[in-house]
Amino acid sequence: MKCSFLLLGACVVNLALASATTVSSSIAAFPTPKYRISPLDGSIIALPTREQLDFQDKEFGVLIHFEMGTYLDIDGCNNVPSLVPNLTLFDPALLNTDQWMDSITALGAKYATLVAKHNCGFTTWPSQVKFQTRDNTTISYNYTIAQSPVAGEDVVKSFIDSAKKYGIGYGLYYSTVVNNFLNVQQSEVNATSWAVGQVRISNETYDEIVVAQLTELWTNYRSLTEIWFDGGYSTTQQIVYADLLAELQPKAVIFNACDVMTGECLTENSVRWVGTESGEAPIENWSTGTTNDGGNSTSPYFCPAVCDTTLQTDDRWFYGVDQPLRSIEELIAVYHVSVGRNCLLELDLSPNRSGLIPGRHAARYKQLGDFISSCYSSPVNAPHTQNSSNDGTYTLKFDYATSIDRIMLMEDQTNGQVIRSYRVWAKVINDGVTDGTLDVPWTEVSNGTSIGHKKIDIFDEAITVTEVLVNTTFVDTPVWRSASVHLCGQMFANTTGWEFTP
């Protein structure tokens, strides 16, 4: 980029000029969808990138809210445009990101995404960006951790160092559309009034600051697993972001990277928001489509869904003093209506004002992790044979009658998601049957549409079976990753009947 106006460290970067050049020369910067045509019926089958498939394999991550909002009685600076909290508030005296990783690994999460800048405008890394105010004065972006009581710390670096140590994938969240410090809402500067602590700038300068800070994050903390665009991004900046991602973070998966109106995506490695913060995906949830819902089986875009939700009640993301936690029963149900419905689950992790995961939070994370591991780390251990065939069926035949209460299905999506519906049948041994020669009929025990990366069906009650059969409809011959049955025990029997209400 050419150097002349906006200061980024020691270099003066004319990002406005760079942006204008990019827009005029890179109209085709948005990646085109990759798909193939079904040899059976001519329908479109969207094709994934390796990064999207690897991300779906992680299944479960955390979204870490630790920023200026941690120190407020309300849940961050959301919907309070004039609020610029005093820098002296941010004072995590016991900050220890390794301790965060202890809870993340106990939960079984495979990646973590840190909120590096939320809507207050405070940056948890010592941003070096300088910019020009409306009165033509060049100043530093001085609402950062470097001006706080813990100057010298860098939360982003500490978090990433800990994630690497623990073998956890790491990502970063940066809110591009709201910045109270700069008096910005929905990517627009309020040029008519300013509150105490706010800095007066132009819209053009704001765009430059965002690009400069994203450049800092994406350059200094490379190899990100996930990048979050919360609330979307400015349409005037779309191509700039697309080019920047392609240059600096070509392997990162990007949350909320597609325009739901036009369908244009900033990157091939896009994932979409499922549309709610309850942690529940629609029952029919496809790996394809760019809208904030259950997706679209006919879309040419492969774009898996992410289900983000909170540990604390009342949709509280930042740490709340004495804020109640959601019950273990509710969280287990959330797992089943997210991961169990082909959606990546991102559960909030909210360190307290000391910079630590509170004990009661840590205990709840471990409860959930223990349940997931005990239920799904291995299927029922009864000896059996299994077989899949080109007609889309998968069979499990047991050496003797075996008790199960759920089935887990996984489709190999390397060449796209091709199964369009399925039915699960079982030969069920009813109580009181004593005739060993009885020809047990097939009983349908579950059914659905989308399988994708993973679908978990929990039966109304445990059943005893000798054989299980899954048959499907499809737009090309399915390739199964696995079909397994599980019995998760009476300890959690009450969770299967818990009614999920967003």
Image (tube, helix red, strand yellow):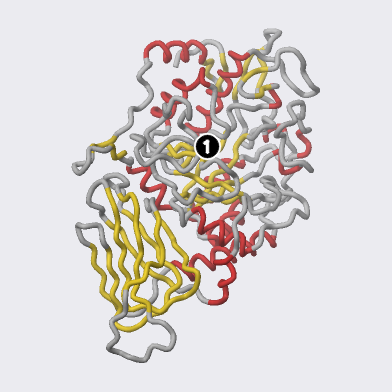
Which residue corresponds to the image point at 58% horizontal and 43% vertical from the top-left?
Answer: 276
137 or 359: which is nearer to us? 359
When asked about the image quadrant of residue 119, the answer is top right
- Please provide percent x and percent y for residue 495: 58, 67
Above or below residue 417? Residue 2 is above
Which residue corresponds to the image point at 40% horizontal and 52% vertical from the top-left?
Answer: 57
Disc 1 crowd rating (10 Å Cα; few below 14, some 14-19, many 20+) is many
Which residue corresponds to the image point at 49% horizontal and 41% vertical from the top-left?
Answer: 293
State the residue position of label 1: 228
Above or below residue 366? Residue 217 is above
Residue lying farthest to the bottom in this orientation: 434
Q: Regarding mark 1 in the picture, which secondary structure is present there? A: strand
**Please, what is the three-letter code of the amino acid marked with disc 1?**
Trp
- Please provide percent x and percent y for residue 203: 61, 14
- Please provide percent x and percent y for residue 2: 46, 13
141 or 349: which is nearer to us? 349
274 or 316: which is nearer to us? 274
Q: In the drawing, does residue 210 fall left or right of residue 169?
A: right
